[in-house]
Image (cartoon, rainbow, N blue to C red):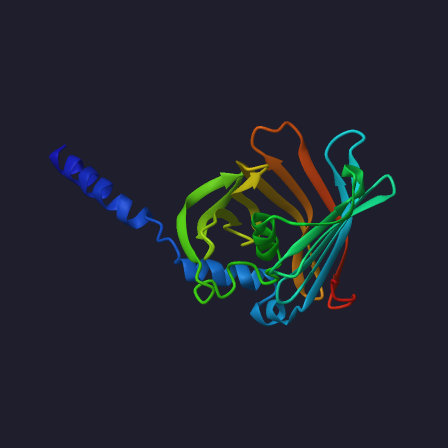
C-alpha cells in the first residue's frame, strides 16, 4: 500500500510538467498568421485594394458598399442606399464626407478623430506587419474560445495609443475577431468585428463575411463581400 501511494504521488507530481503547454512567442504567432494570409512578400506588394459588397443592419436597412484603399494612407468609402450614394475620403492628413441622406450634399471636413481612424483603416498591411518598426506593442493576453474555436488573444497597442484585441484561430491562424473602443458622437463605444468565409484573391486571404456589433446597440451590421480587386482600379481621389 505504501509503495502504491508513493507511486501515485510520484506520477501525480510529474503529470503537470509533462502536460504543460508551452505557449509560442508573439513573433511566432504573428509569423504564422502572416503566412496564412499569403506571406509577407504578397502582403507588402499590394498597392491598392478595392472591396465591394452588400451591407445590412436589419429589415429594410440595406446598402451597397465599396471600400478603396491605397498607399500610403488614402481611403475612400462609398455606401449607396436606395440609389443615393454617400462618400467618405481621406488622404491621411485630412478628410471629407458627403452624405445626401443626411442633407450634406457638399463635402464636409472630417473631425480629427475620424481622420485618425481612416489612417488606421488605410494600413493595407495591417498592424501586425512590421509592428515593432511602426511603434506598436503586441502582447499575448491569453487563449480563449470564440464561437467554439480556440484562439490566441493578442493585445495590440498602436503607436497612436489606441488599444485593440485581435483573436487569431490557433489552428488556421486566421483573424476571426477584433475588439476595440471607438468614439461615436463624442462617446466611447466598444466595437466587435467578427470575420468569416475566408477566400483567396491573387494568393492573399480575405474575409468575405464581416459582422460589426457596437456595445449597447441592438442591431448588427452584416457585410457580405462580393468582389475584391487588388492593384486593378484607379487610385482613390
Q: Quadrant of residue 194?
A: top right
Residue 141 at what x, y percent from top left? 40, 47
Q: Residue at x 61, y 54 (%)?
A: 121
Does 48 appear above or below 96? below
**Residue 67 at what x, y percent from top left?**
72, 54
- x, y percent for residue 111: 60, 48
Quadrant in which the N terminus appears:
top left
Name the residue nearer the viewer: 6 or 180: 180
User: Which residue is farthest right?
Assistant: 83
Residue 46's x, y, as percent? 66, 68
Q: Quadrant of residue 76?
A: bottom right
Please name the residue shown 52% across and 52% down the image. Answer: 171
Nearer to us in this view, 60 or 116? 116
Q: Residue furthest left?
A: 2
Position of the C terminus, as image quadrant, is: bottom right
Residue located 78% across and 29% down the image? 59
Q: Nearer the viewer, residue 58 or 68?
A: 68
Amino acid at each position: 500500500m505504501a509503495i502504491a501511494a508513493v507511486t501515485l504521488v510520484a506520477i501525480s507530481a510529474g503529470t503537470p510538467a509533462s502536460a504543460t503547454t508551452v505557449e509560442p512567442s508573439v513573433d511566432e504567432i504573428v509569423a504564422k498568421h502572416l503566412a496564412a494570409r499569403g506571406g509577407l512578400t504578397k502582403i507588402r506588394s499590394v498597392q491598392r485594394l478595392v472591396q465591394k459588397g452588400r451591407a445590412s443592419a436589419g429589415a429594410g436597412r440595406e446598402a451597397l458598399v465599396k471600400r478603396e484603399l491605397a498607399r500610403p494612407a488614402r481611403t475612400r468609402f462609398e455606401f449607396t442606399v436606395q440609389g443615393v450614394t454617400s462618400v467618405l475620403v481621406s488622404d491621411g492628413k485630412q478628410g471629407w464626407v458627403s452624405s445626401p441622406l443626411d442633407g450634406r450634399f457638399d463635402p464636409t471636413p472630417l473631425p480629427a478623430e475620424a481622420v485618425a481612424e481612416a489612417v488606421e483603416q488605410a494600413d493595407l498591411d495591417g498592424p501586425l506587419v512590421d509592428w515593432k518598426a511602426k511603434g506598436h506593442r503586441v502582447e499575448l493576453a491569453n487563449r480563449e474560445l470564440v464561437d467554439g474555436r480556440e484562439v490566441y488573444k493578442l493585445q495590440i497597442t498602436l503607436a497612436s495609443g489606441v488599444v485593440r484585441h485581435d483573436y487569431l484561430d490557433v489552428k488556421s491562424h486566421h483573424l476571426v475577431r477584433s475588439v476595440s473602443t471607438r468614439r461615436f458622437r463624442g462617446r466611447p463605444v466598444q466595437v466587435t468585428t467578427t470575420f468569416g468565409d475566408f477566400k483567396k484573391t491573387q494568393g492573399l486571404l480575405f474575409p468575405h463575411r464581416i459582422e460589426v456589433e457596437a456595445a449597447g446597440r441592438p442591431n448588427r451590421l452584416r457585410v457580405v463581400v462580393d468582389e475584391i480587386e487588388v492593384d486593378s482600379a484607379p487610385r482613390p481621389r
